[in-house]
């Protein structure tokens, strides 16, 4: 079924009447999945004003138990309609159906985590007599919702990453104007409609569609907007931060994640993890395995195990249960990566597997003999491609892993607990996984990066904190 959507404002869909728009097409075969009408400037302003009014009249006054119930019912509804959502993710994002089902499962968890956290978002009693002169006083601080949140989301996890912003905002008592990725707006609209079915007040979440260059400058500078949360590319993210001025901003940006394997590690587990983390959803995750550092003592055996597994991955139609790697989001994205591979080869790199392109499909690639200056190493590939690099000492590999503008997550495979803690301290990343790949993300821990990988933290409880302010009251007792 082809879906036609517009812009959702105060529970009403605005479309037609000469609004510009475009067709949403499958990245795999180009078939039309749906169409979307863009928001006009009047639509955008109305969405922001509606969010401001609903915040003042409804959401900031809504008891925590009611917000919790809405989120819990949303989770139950999503679970009952999980198959529909997985199919839609498969069609509009080109996500292999198994990956799509996994994303739906995570999205359900996010809603349930948020439902629980809505009732925990409290403050603290402050012991005033800890300070000289504080006798006879009591104080407490509580968290209050910031107000209207501008949420700008990417194409690669069009359900789960939307919920990391929507579910947490609702749990905090905020309202939202959502600008989903133009490539994947259908699942976002379907999700917000589901939340309204679960009891979310009309106008608590408003959806505006269109290109970021047209909508974002107004969205992130409007005086009603108090918080901006963005997931996407670094250049766009830091431009948004600049525009946002003194507003609270969370940026979840890119990476070229390092993963390090020592001889004492379980080699089979490490290889299996690299295959999963480097090629799942065609490598289109900011924490996708990209730079694999292998101790020289196991470099040959590692490649002997890795390359055959990569060559056996099934590339093709994402709707098939047997497909491991589907298309990139556009053919242009695949062409870019193909050019990066060719450039690396011209500079001395070798391709041990994959690298062939068919339209938007790119066969999973393994590159060796790479140099730190090559794009496939120093930039974010965002594609099914890994580089494998030998190392000799801890100091050498720490320096190589940290030689990056990015710092989101890393993986270290070792059974030496002392080494694990040394690397936890030494690696310049927001998160370090031990005996696990960088691509693992659970939705209940503080997630975010350093350097050009972002500002602030997501993960349900952390995101709720980012969407609240701390307000203090002191009382002098008579």
Image: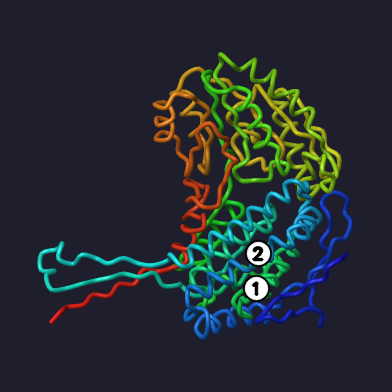
Decide: few, some or many residues near mark 1? Use Cα within 10 Å; few <14, some 14-19, many ≥20.
some
Decide: few, some or many residues near mark 2? Use Cα within 10 Å; few <14, some 14-19, many ≥20.
some
> Image quarter for residue 73?
bottom right
- SS at badge 2: helix
Residue indicated by mark 1: 198
> Image quarter for residue 422?
top left
- SS at badge 1: loop
In the figure, 126 relative to 52: above or below?
A: above
Q: Residue 262: x percent and y percent?
A: 52, 22
- Which colouring convention does the figure follow? rainbow
- First-in-chain label (1 vs 2): 2
The residue closer to the viewer here, 216 or 153, is: 153
Q: Residue 346: x percent and y percent?
A: 73, 26
> At x 64% / y 36%, what residue is drawn?
375
In the figure, 417 relative to 157: above or below?
A: above
In the figure, 402 relative to 235: above or below?
A: above
Q: Quadrant of the C terminus?
A: bottom left
Apparent side of residue 284 relative to residue 68 in the rendered image (left or right):
right
Q: Return the mark for residue 71.
A: none
Q: Residue 426: x percent and y percent?
A: 41, 33
> At x 61% / y 39%, what residue is drawn?
379
> Marks 1 and 2, how far apart in space?
9 Å
Apparent side of residue 85 relative to residue 239 in the rendered image (left or right):
right
The residue closer to the viewer here, 53 or 323, is: 323
Q: Quadrant of the N terminus?
A: bottom right
In the figure, 264 relative to 425: above or below?
A: above
Q: Are marks 1 and 2 in contact (CB under 8 Å)?
A: yes
Residue indicated by mark 2: 76
């Amino acid at each position: 079924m082809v879906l036609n959507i517009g812009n959702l404002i105060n529970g009403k869909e605005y479309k037609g009447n000469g609004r510009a728009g475009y067709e949403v097409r499958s990245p795999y075969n180009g078939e039309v999945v749906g169409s979307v009408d863009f928001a006009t400037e009047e639509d955008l302003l109305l969405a922001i004003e509606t969010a401001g009014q609903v915040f003042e009249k409804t959401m900031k006054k809504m008891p925590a138990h009611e917000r919790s119930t809405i989120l819990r019912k949303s989770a139950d509804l999503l679970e009952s309609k999980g198959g529909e959502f997985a199919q839609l993710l498969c069609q509009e994002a080109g996500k292999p159906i198994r990956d799509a089902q996994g994303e739906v499962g995570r999205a359900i968890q996010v809603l349930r985590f948020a439902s629980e956290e809505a009732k925990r978002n409290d403050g603290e009693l402050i012991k005033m007599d800890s300070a000289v002169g504080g006798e006879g006083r009591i104080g407490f601080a509580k968290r209050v919702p910031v107000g209207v949140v501008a949420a700008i989301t990417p194409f690669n996890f069009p359900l789960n990453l939307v919920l990391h912003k929507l579910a947490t905002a609702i749990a905090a008592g905020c309202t939202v104007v959502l600008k989903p990725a133009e490539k994947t707006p259908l699942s976002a609209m379907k999700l917000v409609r589901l939340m309204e079915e679960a009891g979310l007040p009309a106008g608590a979440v408003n959806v505006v569609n269109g290109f970021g260059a047209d909508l974002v400058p107004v969205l992130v500078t409007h005086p009603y907007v108090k918080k901006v949360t963005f997931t996407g590319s670094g250049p766009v993210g830091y431009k948004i931060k600049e525009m946002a001025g003194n507003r609270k901003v969370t940026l979840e940006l890119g990476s070229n994640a390092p993963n390090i394997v020592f001889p004492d590690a379980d080699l089979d587990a490490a290889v299996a993890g690299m295959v999963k983390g480097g090629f799942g959803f065609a490598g289109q995750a900011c924490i996708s395995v990209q730079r694999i550092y292998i101790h020289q003592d196991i470099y040959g055996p590692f490649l002997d195990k890795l390359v055959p597994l990569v060559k056996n991955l099934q590339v093709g139609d994402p709707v098939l249960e047997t497909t491991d790697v589907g298309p990139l989001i556009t053919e242009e994205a695949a062409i870019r990566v193909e050019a990066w591979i060719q450039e690396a080869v011209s500079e001395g790199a070798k391709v041990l597997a994959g690298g062939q392109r068919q339209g938007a499909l790119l066969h999973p690639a393994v590159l060796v003999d790479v140099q730190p200056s090559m794009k496939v190493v120093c930039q974010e590939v965002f594609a099914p491609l890994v580089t494998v690099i030998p190392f000799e000492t801890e100091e050498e590999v720490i320096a190589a892993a940290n030689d990056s503008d990015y710092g989101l997550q890393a993986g270290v495979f070792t059974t030496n607990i002392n080494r694990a803690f040394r690397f936890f301290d030494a690696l310049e990343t927001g998160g370090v996984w031990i005996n696990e790949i960088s691509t693992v993300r659970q939705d209940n821990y503080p997630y975010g990066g350093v350097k050009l990988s972002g500002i602030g933290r997501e993960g349900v409880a952390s995101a709720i904190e980012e969407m609240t302010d701390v307000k203090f009251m002191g009382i002098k007792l008579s």
